[in-house]
Image (tube, rainbow, N blue to C red):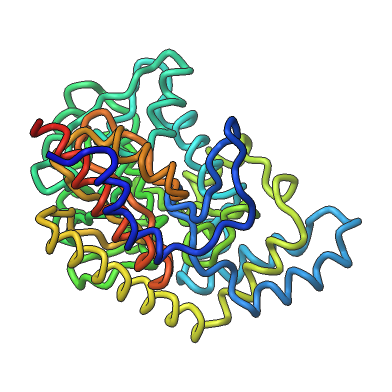
Amino acid sequence: MTTRRTFFQGLGGAAAAMPRLAAQSGPTSAPPVLLRLSSNESAYGPFPSMVRAMAKACERGNYYVGGEAQAVRQRLAELHGAPAASVVLGAGSSEPLRVTTQVFAGERRPPVVAEPTFEAVARSAEIAGNPAVKIPLDARGVHDVEKMVDAARKNSAGMIYLCNPANPTGTIISGQQLRWTVDNLPADTVLVADEAYSDFVDDPQFETALPYVKQGRPVVILKTFSKIYGLAGMRLGYAIASPDLIRRMAPRLLGGMALNQAVVAGALAGLEDKAEYQRIRALNAQVRRYVTEEFRKMGYASTESQANFVMVDLKRPIGPVSAGLNRGGFAVGRLFPSMPHHLRITLGTMEDMKRFMPLVRAIATEAQSHRDC
């Protein structure tokens, strides 16, 4: 049986691989954080070209955002082959997501969501006294679109929220499943396709919902600069939908008043920097393969993530594992109650993850040994 002493001795190799803390913690202070692997933020930060553009934009910080926001809308419209009237900006994609819930999931018309998923829709609906209908993911951690559509029909749902790739599992639905979902939407139900992590996908089965927007179907797409572009702390996202749907949403959005000069300048620079975009995509895919393979060697299966995070089944309650990782200086994803043995881990750089994996191996092994005692 592993004792506490032998456990910490066993952590020697992992601890040696971790960088020295900048400052020592006092006996009552919170543990220092070496690395935040909890919120699916970019490990690489904004592109260098974006940082330069944002620094320059600070010289205009005394002016409210006006025409600059329109320039971003126009560039996004060109990029997606849609009219500018089909694009609306927000403070991250969370703001247009909140607004879609308010507009399309009104009184007695609940949203249908997966369980688990990004919680913002269910929270907004609950605050409005209109609880979401939750449909469990299938055994692979993928949206069960047939059951979601059936639930939407039975509950006269105002919207179906489809996170693709899914948060927290990172899995995708195929283009064929997406087409079936759009073709089978109940009357007056809007499909909200959250594609926040689509920039990281390399599976050819993935398809964006953009063609359905262009066809005028009842589809709203959400995208963000928070992930691959590294602007989570700057807040810029957008929705793409038919002009009719955008007109219903627009009065509830803050628009340019929610933005700042730096973020719009950074976004414009990032959209033009294709080389850095592809470099980060490739790095993320390489790290994702490394992490999933390391977990496989440990005997732990992870979902088939196409995002910048992985969801791994540790076969035990994740609370003690998360606590141990926090004590070691690594903040990891929160508990998802419907998947209590799964841990969501944001991907850092390869150097980051080579520091992290020995520690998670040691802590997971210790947690298992205590269960076996």
Left or right position of 143 against 225: left
Position of the N terminus by quadrant: top left
Tell me where residue 234 sits by quadrant.
Answer: bottom right
Give the camera-side residue of 85 and 109. 109
Q: Position of residue 267 (x, y in %)?
A: 62, 67
Left or right position of 258 against 369: right
Residue 215 in view here: no
Residue 259 vs 76, above or below: the answer is above
Looking at the image, which residue is at 39% across and 17% down?
130
Outermost residue, bottom direction?
Answer: 275
Residue 61 vs 154, above or below: the answer is below
Give the camera-side residue of 304 and 273. 304
Residue 145 vs 285, above or below: the answer is above
Give the camera-side residue of 283 and 59. 283
Q: Position of residue 147 (x, y in %)?
A: 12, 35
Residue 13 in view here: yes
Looking at the image, which residue is at 53% across and 38% down?
248
Q: Position of residue 225 (x, y in %)?
A: 54, 60
Left or right position of 160 against 292: right
Looking at the image, which residue is at 44% across and 76% down?
280
Tell me where residue 85 sits by quadrant.
Answer: bottom right
Left or right position of 73 against 81: right
Tell me where residue 165 sits by quadrant.
Answer: bottom left
Total marks drawn? 0
